[in-house]
Image (spheres, helix red, strand yellow):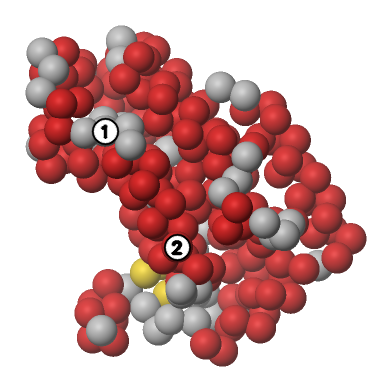
């Protein structure tokens, strides 16, 4: 994993934000039209939202690095490494539809692609095996990021994720004899414990998604 290159990109984006305030301005312009399901603290709502986006971006290489480490420890590196490399390339060589995006608000798109790729792979493993490949749940944080990016662009990013996973995980991937062994290793308490250091990102930062409101609004 070339996480130093990812962190360098993020460091440069932080410098860009410090000199331009571009992310804070963009989020400030969205405050009045945020989806009603996104719940922010009553005090310093914009600050909380900005910290969420910053942490969501900052967290992406850490999650990829942790996933690589856990995969190695669990003996499933050959299975998970292609997933992580695609997520890494979303940062280093983003798809053409993201051309011209820069700064932390631009890296929100790349971070969303990386987090969503892991989520999509997990969803497919749950559907076939009854449990995720990577025991990490970023669903709420991804839904919030989707709302911040906005439609239809976030939907285009989702399509890019689906296309990448479709080309990487076909039905034969789940019919291998080794898949059961992967599932058994992921049930190991040591593997599960290793992921406890990654609590729900949105809850950590005081940004919640009230799902009953989402259903009511839909």
Give how far apart the Cα atoms at labels 2 and 1 are: 20 Å
Question: Who's the residue at 20% across and 26% down the image?
Answer: 173
Left or right, residue 119 beside residue 50: left
Q: Secondary structure at mark 2?
A: helix
Question: Who's the residue at 60% across and 81% down the image?
Answer: 30
Q: Quadrant of the C terminus?
A: bottom left
Question: Who's the residue at 36% across and 47% down the image?
Answer: 163
Left or right, residue 196 beside residue 49: left
Which image quarter: residue 108?
bottom right
Q: Is residue 135 visible?
A: no
x%, y% of residue 127? Answer: 13, 42
**Callout 1 crowding tier (Cα within 10 Å): few <14, some 14–19, many ≥20:** some
**Callout 2 crowding tier (Cα within 10 Å): few <14, some 14–19, many ≥20:** few
Left or right, residue 145 beside residue 8: left
Residue furthest out toward the right? 19
x%, y% of residue 137? Answer: 33, 46
As rendered, which of 205 and 54 lies closer to the eye?
54
Q: Is residue 1 visible?
A: yes
Q: Which residue is mark 2?
A: 156
Which image quarter: residue 215?
bottom left
Which image quarter: residue 179?
top left
Q: Secondary structure at mark 1?
A: loop
Please say if 177 is above or below 210: above
Please say if 127 is above or below 54: above
As rendered, which of 204 and 53 lies closer to the eye?
53
Question: Who's the residue at 21% across and 41% down the image?
Answer: 124
Checking the image for residue 77, the label placed there is none
Q: Quadrant of the N terminus?
A: top right
Left or right, residue 147 beside residue 192: right
Q: Which residue is mark 1?
A: 169
């Amino acid at each position: 994993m070339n996480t130093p290159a990812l962190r360098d990109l993020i460091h440069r984006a932080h410098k860009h934000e410090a000199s331009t305030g571009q992310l804070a301005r963009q989020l400030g312009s969205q405050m009045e039209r945020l989806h009603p399901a996104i719940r922010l603290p009553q005090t310093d709502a914009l600050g909380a939202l900005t910290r969420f986006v910053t942490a969501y971006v900052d967290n992406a290489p850490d999650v990829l690095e942790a996933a690589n480490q856990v995969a190695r420890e669990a003996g499933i590196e050959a299975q998970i490494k292609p997933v992580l490399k695609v997520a890494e390339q979303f940062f280093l060589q983003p798809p053409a539809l993201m051309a011209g995006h820069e700064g932390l608000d631009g890296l929100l798109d790349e971070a969303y692609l990386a987090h969503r790729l892991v989520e999509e792979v997990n969803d497919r493993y749950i559907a076939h095996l009854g449990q995720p490949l990577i025991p990490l749940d970023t669903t709420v944080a991804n839904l919030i990021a989707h709302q911040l990016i906005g439609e239809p662009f976030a939907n285009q990013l989702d399509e890019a994720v689906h296309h990448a996973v479709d080309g990487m995980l076909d039905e034969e991937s789940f019919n291998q004899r080794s898949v059961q062994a992967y599932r058994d290793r992921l049930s190991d308490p040591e593997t599960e414990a290793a992921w406890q250091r990654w609590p729900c990102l949105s809850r950590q930062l005081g940004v919640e998604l009230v799902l009953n409101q989402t259903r009511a609004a839909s």
